[in-house]
Amino acid sequence: MGLHRFPEPSLTAAQRLADASREINTLISECADDDWDGYGAKAVDNASCFRAICFMVALPTDVPPPEVGVDPDGEVSLDWIVGPQRVFSVSIGGKGELHYAGLFGRAKSCGNETFLGEVPAAVSHNLRRLLLSTNT
């Protein structure tokens, strides 16, 4: 994870699919076995990987791609980091469960949703909050 500026998003659905697949395949190769982090982390969950790819493809085209990682429980995490107090993270489980948390200055937001092929409204709203905060 690191501080970065959002690039101008102009990726087609095919480019998003290719980029997401490449990122996830890297995670699979790096985190395929239990204890991949040396601290007892579970192996990355293949169903979570599939759902993460689908989620990233479903993102609106004006949302920049996230940084992709694996949580110690094996779920895939997607992070948008603007600064120390401007972050949003979504963790994706193998059955489509989404756990999200965001920090927008002093305001916080967190919750759970289900991914059914479209980005849930609450997640989309929080991504917009983050993106709008970068333009002010």
Image (cartoon, rainbow, N blue to C red):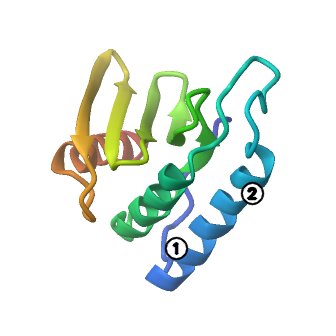
Disc number lying in front (1 or 2): 2
Residue drawn where x is 25% and y is 33% of the image: 112
Which image quarter holds the C terminus? Answer: top left
In the rendered view, tell whether residue 14 sits above or below residue 89.
below
Residue 85 pos. (x, y %): 46, 22
The answer to whether residue 35 is visible is: yes
Could you tell whether 62 is left or right of 28 in the image?
left
The secondary structure type at the circle numbered 1 is: helix
Which image quarter holds the N terminus? Answer: top right
The answer to whether residue 63 is visible is: no
Q: Which of marks 1 and 2 is nearer the N terminus?
A: 1
The residue lying furthest to the front in this view is 34
Residue drawn where x is 78% and y is 54% of the image: 29
In the rendered view, tell whether residue 130 sits above or below residue 66.
above
Q: Which is more toward the observer, 62 or 13?
A: 13
Amino acid type at circle 2 is Thr
Label ID, residue 26: 2
To which quarter of the image does residue 104 belong? Answer: top left
Q: Which is more toward the observer, 44 or 15?
A: 44
Residue behind mark 1: 16
Label ID, residue 110: none
Amino acid type at circle 1 is Arg
Q: Which is more toward the observer, 71 or 82?
A: 71
